[in-house]
Amino acid sequence: MSESVYKVIELVGTSETSWEDAVKHAVETAAKSLTDLRVAEVSELDVKLEDGKVVAYRAKVKLSFKYHTE
C-alpha cells in the first residue's frame, strides 16, 4: 500500500425533508469541486425551527478526500 495524505473538511448540509437528504446534499455539492472523496462522517444533526415547527434539517458532515501533491 502506498502512503497517502487526506484532508478533512467540515460542511453543513440542509434539507426541508430529512437529515439523510441534508447529508446527501452536502456530499454531492462537495463532489462537484473536489476529487477522490473517501469518507463522510456525520458529526451533528439538528433542526431549524420557526413558530415551533421544524422547517429544515441540518447535518454537519466531516468529509475526507485524498490530497494530491502533483
Image: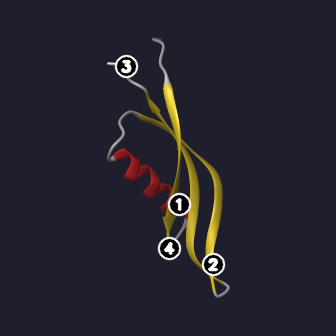
Residue receiving disc 4: 16
| Amino acid beneath label 1 | Glu
Image quadrant where residue 25 sits? bottom left
**Residue 10 percent coordinates (x, y):** 54, 46
Q: Please identify, in this view, whether the residue under mark 1 or under mark 3 is nearer the observer.
A: 3
**Do tag 2 and tag 3 residues touch (Cβ < 8 Å)?**
no
Q: Please identify, in this view, whether the residue under mark 1 or under mark 4 is nearer the observer.
A: 4
Mark earlier in primary sequence (1, 3):
1
Mark earlier in primary sequence (2, 1):
1
Mark earlier in primary sequence (4, 2):
4
Gap between marks 1 and 4, in whole Å? 11 Å
Q: Please identify, in this view, whether the residue under mark 2 or under mark 1 is nearer the observer.
A: 2
Residue receiving disc 3: 69
Q: Please identify, in this view, whether the residue under mark 4 or under mark 2 is nearer the observer.
A: 2
**Which element carries disc 3, helix, strand or loop?**
loop
**Residue 52 percent coordinates (x, y):** 68, 85
Q: Residues within 10 Å of mark 3 (few under 14, many from 20)?
A: few
**Do tag 1 and tag 3 residues touch (Cβ < 8 Å)?**
no
Residue receiving disc 2: 49
**Which element carries disc 2, helix, strand or loop?**
strand
Q: Is residue 1 above or below residue 37?
A: above
**Which element carries disc 1, helix, strand or loop?**
helix
Q: Please identify, in this view, whether the residue under mark 4 or under mark 3 is nearer the observer.
A: 3
In the displayed structure image, the side of residue 59 where residue 28 appears, left or right:
left
Residue receiving disc 1: 20
